[in-house]
Image: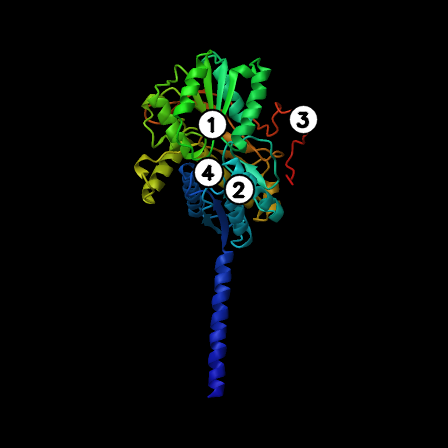
Amino acid sequence: MQRRSLIKAFTLSASIAAMGLSWTIQAAETIKVGILHSLSGTMAISETSLKDMALMTIDEINAKGGVNGKKLEPVVVDPASNWPLFAEKARQLLTQDKVAVVFGCWTSVSRKSVLPVFEELNGLLFYPVQYEGEEMSPNVFYTGAAPNQQAIPAVEYLMSEDGGAAKRFFLLGTDYVYPRTTNKILRAFLHSKGVQDKDIQEVYTPFGHADYQTIVADIKKFSAGGKTAVISTVNGDSNVPFYKELGNQGLEATEVPVVAFSVGEEELRGIDTKPLVGNLAAWNYFESVKNPENSKFVADWKAYAKAKNLPNYSTAVTNDPMEATYVGIHMWAQAVEKAGSTDVDKVREAMGGQTFKAPSGFTLTMDKTNHHLHKPVMIGEIQDDGQFNVVWKTAEPIRAQPWSPFIPGNDKKPDFAVRSN
């Protein structure tokens, strides 16, 4: 009897061990990929679609056999527009979930929050949104625009005859690092063009701000002093009340054009855009661009939104950070294939010089030294259907200048990625 019990116990132990081995093998057959975007809070209006685009891109790669014969396994977390929580979730993804890479963040404050974690643990973050520059980490690949790929060309356009020949500038932003640093760069740039401080006004509002009545009235008052343009670095769901107030007060683009750096097709989905026709946005991609790659990209996204029954799937749109997410994931997959490994140091080396034919219609290149994409610049005019008509674009992709030449001392900084701490 004792012998039979021992045999049973041995058989059970062997079965459990086999199951554990099976789970280990199964886990080893996938590559875990972290997705770090706010799915709640003030930034959910912008970031939720990036999470969904990441999942679509992962499905697309898996349908073609995965990466190095392994399927990608997404691990989605919600840092809830809470900047310290971004750091906690980043650490969780790297230490507990053991992801090979993370795609995420929108605001610069969220990126600054997670940066020490990625550098400490030698993780890899792909950041898909335009930003203020002034950073080049070996642990981050920046697939959004630096200031010379968005902000500077946009203001140059506004100062041109085609853009309205603006002489005065109202800089309106959300109160955090991206708008303040971008406006510091823009103020220095405007000074270089002979614009005086009396013709520049800066105003900041907190995240989630909803009452723009006084601010829009101030814009109208400021514009009485000469040809004026508004440069908007307002982020998140605050854009909805801001644009509604522009319409309420009848401030039209022909009178005072607004160029936005954080408003695209997704943010305009819930707004009546008829009063906003003619206002501008500066990006590196718009859904409305015509080329075969974009036709497929848009069609695939709309089909995915319907298949997954995403909220308001019937009005699903693409936008610039979604394209940057799509390009970044594909480039990372190409680098893993080239490296034959998900090892961060090997993938980092393989990322330099990666190219991808993007939905923008341009072949984008990851710079070998500064970890930024070479990107085209486009300026779009809001249409009454919430889409953008591209009124100006560069002939070819522009190399990023993460260290703006308009900030003193930047000319002495290295043109390669170095740790921030």
Q: How many marks?
A: 4
User: Which residue is the site of mark 4?
Assistant: 326
Q: Are marks 2 and 1 in contact (CB under 8 Å)?
A: no
User: Which residue is the site of mark 2?
Assistant: 332
Q: Position of residue 201 (x, y in %)?
A: 51, 20
Mark 3 secondary-structure assignment: loop
Q: Are marks 4 and 2 in contact (CB under 8 Å)?
A: no
Residue at x 51%, y 57% (from the top left corner): 28
Mark 1 secondary-structure assignment: loop
Q: Looking at the image, is mark 2 or mark 1 nearer the viewer?
A: 1
Mark 3 to mark 2 CA distance (whole Å): 33 Å
Amino acid type indicated by mark 1: Phe
On residue 409, the disc is 3
* Sequence-first disc among 3 and 4: 4
Mark 2 to mark 1 CA distance (whole Å): 26 Å
On residue 195, the disc is none
Q: Residues within 10 Å of mark 3 (few under 14, many from 20)?
A: few
Instruction: Name, please, the residue furthest toward the left.
Output: 314
Write down the quadrant of residue 415 in the picture: top right
Question: Would you place residue 315 above or below residue 199 in this image?
Answer: below
Instruction: Name the quadrant of the C terminus.
Output: top right
Write down the quadrant of residue 147 in the picture: top right
Q: Are marks 1 and 3 in contact (CB under 8 Å)?
A: no
Mark 1 to mark 3 CA distance (whole Å): 26 Å
Camera-side residue: 385 or 117? 117
Res. 383 visible in picture: no
Q: Position of residue 373 (x, y in %)?
A: 55, 32
User: Which residue is the site of mark 1?
Assistant: 261
Q: Position of residue 24 (x, y in %)?
A: 51, 61
